[in-house]
């Protein structure tokens, strides 16, 4: 697979970076500054669950951070945050001003790299790819908003990438295969010369395979290899393993 690759793109969230702390804990930390106290001992855990379910629902109702509904990404995230708090007992009417203030602050808060944790294997992988495979174009392919550029600069990895394909700015989002077709057209490579790696089968694997390009799923449990339609050979446990694979094949090519 790797010998013909000219373009390698990476998903971002849960592939290269994750939040430094639990979402619920960070939400509560900011909310408390605006006079919102925890409702119970398990408020943080419930916020984690509420955020996950509301993110999924809102992403279906208003995909790509509300782009086609003429929402700004700030408005989309504010709606998500307020829905998450409402589900765990906060009142959208009486707490409205405090929730709006907390939402605005949280959007800014998560726009900087210190709230994000770099996968411990990411920097070495990107650095070695640059050193040993300079002929490969590296790209980001992520469902994210305008903040991603700043986050990656703060984490000191932006310079590794030749291209940034960010859904909000592209006007296309995963799992639409057109998102990946757009990448092929922009970089001017064929499907057989393109490899994408991510953590989500629906977003990072099936749509890539649909355009006849190459895809790998990173799954520490390796359970993705049991999903119907997924080639077990396309599942890797971590970035370190992937690095070994791609660099070893490069050595064989030489």
Image (spheres, rainbow, N blue to C red):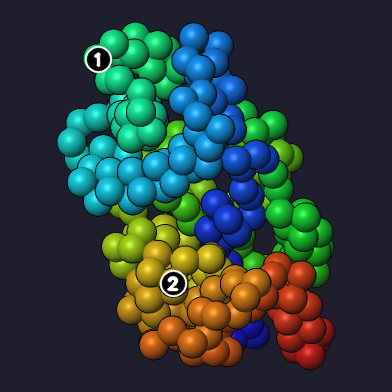
Look at 26% across and 38% down and name the residue there: 66
Q: Nearer the viewer, mark 1 or mark 2?
A: 1
Look at 34% across and 9% down and name the residue there: 97
Which residue is label 2 attached to?
A: 201
Residue 169 is situated, as x and y percent measured from the top left of the image, at 38, 41
Q: Nearer the viewer, residue 224 or 242?
A: 224
Residue 211 position (above or below residue 125): below
Quadrant where the C terminus sits is bottom right
Q: Please give left or right for residue 18 compared with residue 129 in the image.
A: left
Q: CA distance from mark 1 to mark 2?
A: 39 Å
Q: Please give left or right for residue 42 compared with residue 73 in the image.
A: right
Q: Please give left or right for residue 186 compared with residue 24 in the image.
A: left
Residue 127 is situated, as x and y percent measured from the top left of the image, at 79, 57
Mark 2 crowd level (few <14, some 14–19, many ≥20, 10 Å Cα): many
- In the rendering, which numbered label is found on residue 93? 1
Residue 171 is situated, as x and y percent measured from the top left of the image, at 30, 46
Residue 165 position (above or below residue 94): below
Q: Secondary structure at mark 1?
A: loop
Contact flag, marks 1 and 2 (Cβ < 8 Å): no
Q: Secondary structure at mark 2?
A: helix
Q: Nearer the viewer, residue 160 or 54?
A: 54
Q: How many marks?
A: 2
- In the rendering, which numbered label is found on residue 200? none
Quadrant where the N terminus sits is bottom right
Residue 147 position (above or below residue 168): above
Query: Reading the chain from its start, which is encountered first: label 1 or label 2?
Result: 1
One can see residue 80 in this view: no
One can see residue 201 in this view: yes
Residue 130 is situated, as x and y percent measured from the top left of the image, at 75, 60
Mark 1 crowd level (few <14, some 14–19, many ≥20, 10 Å Cα): few
Look at 79% across and 90% down and name the residue there: 252
């Amino acid at each position: 697979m790797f010998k013909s690759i000219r373009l390698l793109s990476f998903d971002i969230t849960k592939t290269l970076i994750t939040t430094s702390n639990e979402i619920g804990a960070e939400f509560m930390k900011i909310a408390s500054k605006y006079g919102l106290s925890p409702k119970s001992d398990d408020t943080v855990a419930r916020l984690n669950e509420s955020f996950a379910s509301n993110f999924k629902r809102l992403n279906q109702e208003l995909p790509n951070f509300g782009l086609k509904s003429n929402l700004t990404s700030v408005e989309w995230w504010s709606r998500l945050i307020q829905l998450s708090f409402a589900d765990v007992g906060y009142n959208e009417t009486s707490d409205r001003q405090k929730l709006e203030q907390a939402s605005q602050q949280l959007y800014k808060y998560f726009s900087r790299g210190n709230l994000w944790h770099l996968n411990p294997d990411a920097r070495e992988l990107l650095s070695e790819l640059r050193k040993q495979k300079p002929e490969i174009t590296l790209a980001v392919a992520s469902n994210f908003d305008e903040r991603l550029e700043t986050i990656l600069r703060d984490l000191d990895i932006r310079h590794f990438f030749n291209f940034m394909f960010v859904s909000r700015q592209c006007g296309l989002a995963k799992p639409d295969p057109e998102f990946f077709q757009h990448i092929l057209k922009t970089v001017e490579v064929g499907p057989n010369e393109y490899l994408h790696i991510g953590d989500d089968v629906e977003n990072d694997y099936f749509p890539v395979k649909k355009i006849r390009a190459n895809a790998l799923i990173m799954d520490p449990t390796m359970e993705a290899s049991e999903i119907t339609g997924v080639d077990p050979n396309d599942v890797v446990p971590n970035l370190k393993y992937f690095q070994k694979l791609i660099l070893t094949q490069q050595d064989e090519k030489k």
